[in-house]
Amino acid sequence: MMDPVADRWAAAGRRGKVGAALVVLLLAAVPLVTTPYITEIVLTGLVLVMLGVSWNMLAGYAGQISLGHAAFFGLGAFVTAWLVSPSGAGLPESIAQPALVAIFVGALVAALLALLVGPIMFRLRGHYFAIGTLALATIIQLILVDQRQYTGGSTGYFITGGPDDLVMYLVALALTLVTVVVTYAVVESRPGLGMKAIHDDESAASSLGVNPLKYKMFAFVLSSFFAGLAGGLYAQYTAFISPDSTLGVVWTIDTLVVVILGGMGTMAGPLLGAALFIVLDNFLSSIVGGLATSVEGALIILFVIFLPGGLYGFVRDRTSDERPPASGEPSVDGRSSDD
């Protein structure tokens, strides 16, 4: 005998997949049917999705609040720039690589940095860890600003060559999908269960045989890889970067805002948050001009106070009148009701 409740959830899952496919098709059509200005706004939104999803894996699922995400974003951007246009940094042309290879190498270098500093950073707990990651980003920024011959300093670094804007946009869309799908697979896998256990109670998880450092390092390295990937995409598309524009704390703040607006600890949260942030940022800029940042800050405070679950939590609460999922049953965001 068929379970009507299970049928409703299965139907909801099918509708979700169809809706996601339509959204992807609409995003793919953006550069063909809109202006370059709108295309750039949407691409910035894709970069924020990658940053939000990757940071959410570390903070929302593993419970490690990092304030240094910009370090890995900026490092990925500069490694990509050096490999695509090595002459700008006085490097030999023999190291020049196609843009896609350079972006991938930039992401690997960002992950390698996380692998090297992770054991040191995770000696810190709670807000000390957050301060440590913020210091890491600041140190890397100061080093790159000081090394003008390699980075252009405050003047910046121009990138020449590589695919045209349409190809880069489609590559950005494809890599954003890869980031979302891989992150979803990870949080639903055994490492994801380890992250959630650490997030809920690290001491209890450790007493049950979970290795906290192992799972925190896994989340930190993978999260940094995707942040570096986003930085490389951003650098190649904008064709101009500087230490201040890629390693500034504003990227970390924007990433936090995206996750807070959408809903921390959920897969759908960063996606909804990035869309809401892009709409708010551009709409407010056209209405209140230079006061847009202040108004955004006030709205974010209101969100934290009145909608702690973010936009996803608000939508879920308004549409969960059928029934909550039973214990252990997957929910819409892929987490069980026991999470």
Image: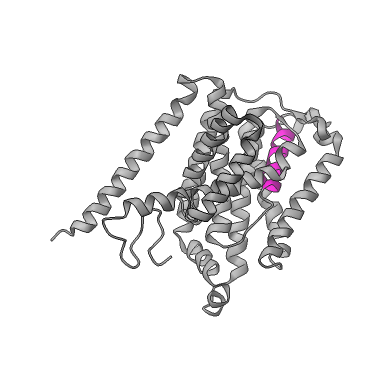
In which quadrant is the N terminus drawn?
A: bottom left
Number of numbered discs on residues: 0
Residue placed most toward the observer, 301 or 65 = 301
In which quadrant is the C terminus drawn?
A: bottom left
Residue 82 lies within the magenta run: yes
Left or right: where 130 falls relative to 305: right
Q: Position of residue 58 (x, y in %)?
A: 58, 57
Residues shaded magenta: 70-84
Left or right: where 107 falls relative to 147: left
Majority SS type along the magenta span:
helix
Q: Position of residue 298 (x, y in %)?
A: 59, 45
Residue placed most toward the observer, 216 or 252 = 252
At a point 50% along the width and 36% down the height, the residue shown is 174
Residue 122 lies within the magenta run: no
Residue placed most toward the observer, 67 or 209 = 67
Residue placed most toward the observer, 100 or 310 = 310
> Is residue 109 shown to the viewer in this render?
no
At a point 48% along the width and 46% down the height, the residue shown is 180
Picture quadrant of residue 236: top right
Q: Position of residue 247 (x, y in %)?
A: 72, 42
Q: Residue furthest left?
A: 1
Q: Position of residue 134 (x, y in %)?
A: 73, 54
Answer above or below: position of 286 versus 71: above
Answer above or below: position of 136 versus 199: above
